[in-house]
Image (tube, grey):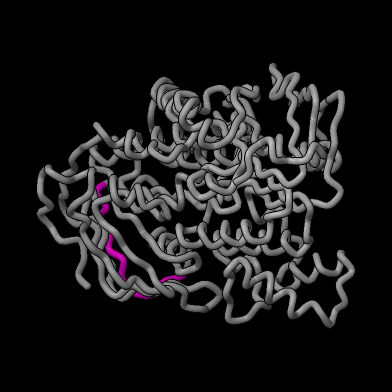
Amino acid sequence: MKKLGDFMAETAVSVEDLKVKFPNEKSFLFKDFSLSVTRGEKVLLVGPSGAGKSTLLKILAGIIPNSVEVPMKCTDCKLPNRYGYVFQDPDSQFCMPYVDEEIAFVLENTQIPPDDMPTLIKKYLDDVCLSLPDIHTKIDRLSGGMKQRLAIASVLALQPDVLFLDEPTAMLDEEGTKQVWDTVMNIASDKTVIIVEHKIEQVFDFVDRIIMINSEGSLVASGEPEVMVHQCKYLFSQYGVWYPSVWQEKLKNDKQCVEVLLPEVTIQQLKGYKNKKELIRVEEVTVNRGDWVVITGDNGSGKSTLLQALAKLIKTKGEISYSMNNDSNYYGYMGYVFQNPELQFITDTVYEELAFSLRNSQLSNDECDRRIMEQLNIFQLDHVKEKHPFQLSVGQMKRLSIAAIAITRPQILLLDEPTFGQDAANTFRMLDYFASLHRSGMTILMVTHDKNIREHYANTEWKIRDGMLTDARRLYETDYHSDRMGVRQSVMGT
């Protein structure tokens, strides 16, 4: 890592006196904001969810306002000539239906001869460790993590001078995250890199400067990583930004206990299919009422597919038996939160989205309103309740998708990567909320790559490998359960 004084004076990207105000918003997102990044510098942007980090990245790249019309003004702005941008949502940047065609499209636009393309396509896929039996695979059949790898590979094919990375590893497991950042570090040693990333421990030694903005889009601190963490640690805590010791501090006095009760879901000889192809298989397993199950495995192993099978969202064979204690009302019995929150939204405002979830609840209007306001507060969405869901940041959209399902108080809650795109404050607020639901007896099944949730919250782990549940075990020694009541029932029958 270089010292800030080591860089040449040449500026790669800059903006001065930036003012941004979205339509129908009362206040500015950025006002008189200035930032300059020198050529070759590696910069990490941090701040709370919804602070405008992704918006700022798009402005620095010139996507706003050149491609996306957003009212903005600045006294001066220097944009890069040749850049690559990895979006927070990888689906938003794909142009072609197949993996190889996506990278070929980029190579064609950079005037690479067709005969050279197959070798280069393989190289860029290898660079991001995206291994496929057939590279002519439809993109919509990839897992979220695989899509993120493909998005990075297609950007690397541009050979950009400036890289803009908006949470490029958010859907990747720990090993995949390390592989991607190792790749970026290897290919970007001479490039300017501007990063938005919550998992800062992976890039801490790579970046030269950390820039922190608050929820109003104001610059509150800027400096070398070591200096920022030691001298501005209170700001990391105040604005809910991840830092290396935040999990240990969170868990220091945060122990609870949960009692395992009766069987809730019994699965036998389950097979899940998409397009007539078997994608997931479970021989035999039982979930007890009040369990908190984490489903782990490599990207593309079948974790999300298993949740979809349990929620009856895909065709299945075999037996799934549920303990339906609410008059067989399947609607109220199980709640499912997709990995991609945009798949769930059907109304025009955040408030209406929550209200729609309660339309069949038979609750009074006053109770519905109380629950809605409670969810808005818990998930830090009260200030955006009149916004359209698609106007939210990715982190806010994810919180809304969870709030809209959890508000119905299902007996079983299925969560696909619920902490994706969240800062530390919102992650811990969300986990505290899940823990309160868990203590009340709710059963939780959660796909996650976060080992801290496995170690400190869950009481059961299912491991998926190559489309099969290979291991299901009780986690005896977690912070959530250690030195507390023993577990009295087995979770699996494999």
Quadrant in the picture for residue 174: bottom left
Query: Is 381 a magenta residue?
Result: no
Decide whether the magenta segment is chiefly helix, strand or loop. strand
Residue drawn at x 38%, y 74% is: 468
289 lies above or below 147: above
Which residue is farthest top?
Answer: 26
Query: Residue 112 placed where, x, y %?
Result: 86, 72
Query: Residue 173 placed where, x, y %?
Result: 47, 58
Quadrant in the picture for residue 139: bottom right
Residue 367 appears anywhere in the view: yes
Q: Is residue 75 left or right of residue 150?
A: right
Residue drawn at x 73%, y 23% is: 33
Quadrant in the picture for residue 374: top left
From the viewer's side, name the closer residue of 9 and 53. 9
Query: Residue 22 placed where, x, y %?
Result: 74, 26
Q: Is residue 33 left or right of residue 332?
A: right
Residue drawn at x 19%, y 52% is: 477
Residue drawn at x 63%, y 22% is: 216
411 lies above or below 129: above
Query: Residue 340 placed where, x, y %?
Result: 56, 51
Q: Is residue 129 left or right of residue 173?
A: right
Residue 24 appears anywhere in the view: no
From the viewer's side, name the closer residue of 340 and 170. 170
Span shown in magenta = 315-325
**Image quadrant containing the C terminus:** bottom left
340 lies above or below 59: below
